[in-house]
Image (spheres, helix red, strand yellow):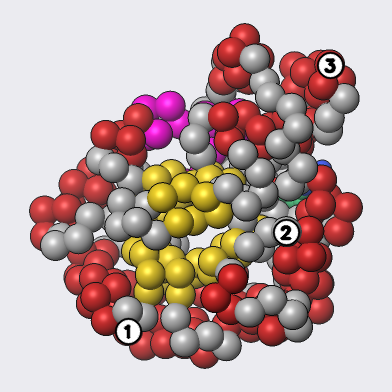
């Protein structure tokens, strides 16, 4: 495994295991720079969303990176209001325009908002027309996947959800495996105000390997088969968050980190969200 390693989705499309996350990364130069630093460090995958408000800055970072579009894997997400209003096609085109691209590598339904089954039909059409290389969902639990699959012609290729050592999501990962969906972890480091990076057990394992707590946490995700989307606006962290391939965690260490689960969610709960 290295920074260029990819996972093959159910339709054969390859997705890089590490993507730069940009949730809460402000619109403007700081997001554009983060994207450029990530690409310079070897990242080829950027994960944004319409609701983040920074698609145009991601686009700016990509355009000024010197890397051609076809070398990159770009994800965006359809926001809840657009799902509810039946504006999927319009919202998709707006995302493309802000990003300055004419296709996406992956387009996700951001949350299972009312009307998501209808939105999925539009994603299927976008996929069939070649405007998107792969389609999937985010924040889906079993009942949401079932709702979608009842009417779907094409099954979601991937599910992206909050996952980190304090919310380790074992059953949801197992469900994704059973349904042939890849899984992506957002807030893999526990999010903006998380305390995972100062957890004593992770610090102890980090000291043993001479790595940072962030590297230990990200390596844990990779060893359980997850695609990771660490967010940072700092160049040194963007670089070190991708240096995960010259060490590995033992089974015991993997279990120790897995045992830190305490059901702490930093974002919304898919079973009861009101946004
Ligand atoms: P910053 O953008 O200031 O670097 P997540 O990926 O779980 O959403 O977590 C991101 C949070 O963790 C951000 O607040 C980010 O802040 C911080 N972060 C990202 N990488 C590291 C790192 N290597 N060490 C410490 N904090 C980090």
Q: Are marks 1 and 2 in contact (CB under 8 Å)?
A: no
- Between discs 3 and 2, the one toward the N terminus: 2
Q: Which residues are magenta?
A: 161-173
The residue beneath circle 1 is: 89
| Gap between marks 1 and 2 measured at Cα | 32 Å
Picture residue at 70% right of the left edge, 54% below the top:
231
Q: Secondary structure at mark 3?
A: helix
- Residue 163 covered by magenta stretch: yes
Viewer-side label of 1, 3: 3
Badge 1 crowding class, 10 Å Cα cut-off, few under 14, some 14 to 19, many 20 or more, is some
Picture residue at 88% right of the left edge, 52% below the top:
236
The residue furthest left is 150
User: Within 8 Å of ligand 1, the CB of disc 3?
Assistant: no
Viewer-side label of 3, 2: 2
User: Within 8 Å of ligand 1, the CB of disc 1?
Assistant: no
- Between discs 1 and 3, the one toward the N terminus: 1
Q: Is any part of residue 85 visible from this angle?
A: no
The residue beneath circle 3 is: 208
Residue 248, given in percent of the width and then of the height, sits at 69, 24
Q: Is residue 140 above or below residue 198?
A: below
Residue 1, given in percent of the width and then of the height, sits at 61, 39
Q: Secondary structure at mark 2?
A: loop
Q: Is residue 204 above or below residue 78?
A: above
Picture residue at 69% right of the left edge, 76% below the top:
67
User: Within 8 Å of ligand 1, the CB of disc 2?
Assistant: no
Q: Which mark is residue 261?
A: none
The residue beneath circle 2 is: 42
Q: Are marks 3 and 2 in contact (CB under 8 Å)?
A: no
- From the viewer's perspective, is 227 left or right of 239? left
């Amino acid at each position: 495994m290295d920074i260029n390693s990819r996972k093959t989705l159910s339709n054969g499309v390859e997705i890089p295991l590490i993507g730069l996350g940009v949730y809460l990364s402000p619109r403007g130069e700081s997001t554009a720079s983060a994207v450029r630093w990530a690409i310079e460090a070897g990242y080829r995958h950027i994960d944004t969303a319409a609701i983040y408000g920074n698609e145009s800055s991601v686009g700016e970072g990509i355009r000024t990176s010197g890397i051609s579009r076809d070398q990159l894997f770009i994800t965006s997400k359809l926001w809840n209001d657009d799902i509810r209003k039946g504006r999927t096609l319009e919202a998709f085109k707006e995302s493309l325009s802000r990003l300055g691209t004419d296709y996406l590598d992956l387009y996700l339904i951001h949350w299972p908002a009312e009307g998501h089954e209808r939105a999925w039909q539009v994603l299927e059409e976008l996929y069939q027309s070649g405007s998107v290389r792969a389609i999937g969902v985010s924040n889906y639990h079993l009942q949401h996947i079932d709702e979608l699959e009842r009417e779907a012609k094409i099954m979601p290729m991937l599910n992206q959800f909050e996952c980190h050592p304090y919310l380790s999501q074992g059953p949801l990962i197992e469900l994704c495996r059973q349904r042939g969906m890849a899984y992506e972890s957002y807030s893999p480091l526990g999010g903006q105000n998380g305390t995972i990076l100062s957890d004593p057990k992770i610090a102890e394992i980090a000291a043993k390997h001479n790595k940072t707590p962030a590297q230990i946490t990200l390596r844990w995700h990779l060893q359980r088969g997850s695609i990771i989307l660490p967010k940072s606006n700092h160049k040194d962290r963007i670089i070190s968050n991708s240096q995960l391939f010259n060490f590995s965690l033992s089974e015991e260490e993997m279990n120790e980190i897995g045992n830190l689960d305490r059901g702490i969610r930093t974002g919304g709960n898919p079973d009861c969200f009101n946004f």
